[in-house]
Image (cartoon, coloured by chain):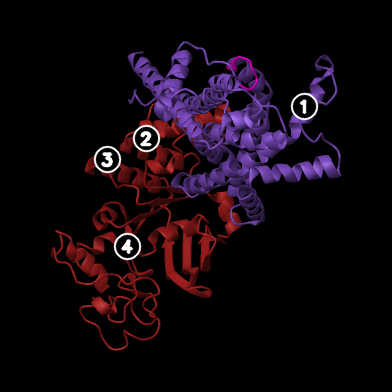
Chain colours: A purple, B red
Amino acid sequence: MKQALFFAGKKAFRALLLLLGVSVASFLLLCASPLDPLRTNVGQAALGSMSQEQVAQLEAYWGADQPPVERYLGWLAGAVRGDLGTSLLYRQPVLTVIGQRLGSSLWLLLTAWVLSGVLGLALGITAGAFRGRWPDKLIRGWCLVISSTPAFWLALLFLLLFSVWLGWLPIGLSVPIGVEEEAVTLADRLQHALLPALTLSVTGVSNIALHTREKLVDVLGSDYILLARARGEREGAIVLRHGLRNVALPALTLQFGSVGEIIGGSVLVEQVFSYPGLGQAAVTAGLGSDLPLLLGVTLVTSGLVFGGNLLADLLYGVIDPRMKRGEGRP
Amino acid sequence: MEPILEIQHLSISFHQYEKGFVQRELPVIRDLSLTLEPGEVTGVLGVSGSGKSLLAHALLDLLPYNSRREGTILFQGEPLTSQRIRKLRGKEIVLVPQGVTYLDPLMKVGPQLRKGRRDRGAREKVRSALARYGLKEAAADLYPFQLSGGMARRVLMASAVMDSPRLVIADEPTPGLDAKAASRLLGHFRELAAEGAAVLFITHDLELALAVAHRVAVFYAGETVEIARASDFPEGRLRHPFTQALWDALPQGAFRAIPGAQPYSGEVKEGCPFLARCPHPGNGCGQGELSLVPWNEGMVRCLYPHGEVMA
């Protein structure tokens, strides 16, 4: 119990440190951005026709008149109290904007995460079990091609293929254009999320598959597999009984560690598909100098990534008998 | 009685790429002949790199894909082909490996020994096999990391005797055990032999081999240079100079080592591989292939073996 509390305290402290560091880094990056918030959001021509008072008012709104340190501390003071401020672009509380965006992104991310994990594991196991033979060569070749392909380019390719040439799927957005919100069906949403989810899954698969394959090859070369063979266990049963079991733990770490990659990928992919998710909000906030929104999005996403890794840590303790039973050595 | 295993002129070589696309055959075991009788423990003695573990792998069809096997192996009178090994291994031909790394670290002992079967019969078999080596039923519920070194060896012994084996191959089964535990383990192998199995005991430790084996086959650079009875060692009836040198290196012998080292396999193209270290080489030792010949109720691969032929 004492140990568990210590563990929780240590993790919480690390999480806080991480969030603080990430927010400082994002803030500094935005400060260093060459984009002038007024010119970007109001426009050069409009600015020219405004009076001094109006310009000063706008500067105050975008925070351009405050020294950076004061500005950051002001944001931090609010954030500590749970108030992430108001988005300058959307003119809504940051939490509301993130809530909406996360809602549409979340299940895109989830689908991609689950799909890439399951597919990656299956492909990796197949490749490892058939090491050196054609299924292995095929899977490995495919994974290498995919992992050297940028996600946004793949997204464009899918758009061309499925939306432009074949016309099976919508070209972008998360709901049909010109339809009232009440009339949007779940099928509509699914149809719109399919391509972005597919792109994200496909790019996520190769990493997991290649790592799983490597691990399985190691396992199949181990002493205990030699004995299993000597004891007359069949090759297929060996892969399923011993291989899968010993690959499962590293695969789990990989799977939860890939949360970060999926979120990173979603930023580009949502941009290509004009999908109004968290990733797109991050891009909009960054380009539009919307400081509160950008910091909010950064906090939430790094929280998700941290949570993913934490979950992997916890699951390890639950699943690995060596950690679970480690204390009670007979 | 019909021998359990007859190995006749067994050679194993590896196919290798040497510098780019130049291929070569690397011989690791050359012209090995050995007969294992029921009720007998045969020690296979050799330093590391002499090819003794590969012999075990060949008998279990576990050689790597780039290897080639030549010669004949008969198991209970019939040729031992890959297909036949795959049917027999784990049942009539079993392996007792070195240690705990040969157990799946993430699977409990019981399920591991049952090989995926869950019926009552399989459970009962595991229970009695464990009990035979003094392990309680609770041991089946342990993970390998919870076993002590000695317990792990006993689990590995138990895994070998699940079905009554005819041929037991022990590949260096004792490292890391104290003298008492090791001698108990050796007793288990003797016991299996007494029940009618043939035991092939592979080791680099001459004292150990002499403690357990009835006969000892000595490997040098992939060749059997001598097959002797265990009693030949203390009685000074050894035939080959290498075997003699091994015995002389022991405290019971002259406690004297010879200089030099075993050549790599394939390094000596012609003649006797021991020639460079031989204390009394003679004419013809550097030419041609030497063959294993009967000598003094044993076998030797030497043109000038020790001792007189007894009528």
Percent coordinates x, y for residue A45 in the rendering:
67, 32
- Mark-to-mark CA distance, 4 and 2: 29 Å
Q: Which mark is residue A190?
A: 1
Question: Which residue range is magenta in the image?
Answer: A88-94
Q: Nearer the viewer, mark 2 or mark 1?
A: 1
Q: Are marks 4 and 2 on the same chain?
A: yes
The number of discs equals: 4
Residue B46's disc number: 4
Magenta part mainly helix, strand or loop? loop
Report the amino acid beneath label 1.
Leu
Q: Residues within 10 Å of mark 2 (few under 14, many from 20)?
A: some
> Residue flagged by tag 2: what amino acid is it?
Tyr
Q: Secondary structure at mark 3?
A: helix
Quadrant of res B135: top left
Mark 1 and mark 4, same subunit? no
Q: Which residue is mark 2?
A: B133
- Image point (47%, 73%), residue name: B19
The disc at residue A315 is none
The numbered disc on residue B181 is 3
Q: Position of residue A261 (x, y in %)?
A: 56, 36
Q: Would you place residue B76 above or below residue B159 in this image? A: below
In the rendered image, is residue A70 in sight? Answer: yes
Q: Earlier in the sequence, mark 3 or mark 2?
A: 2
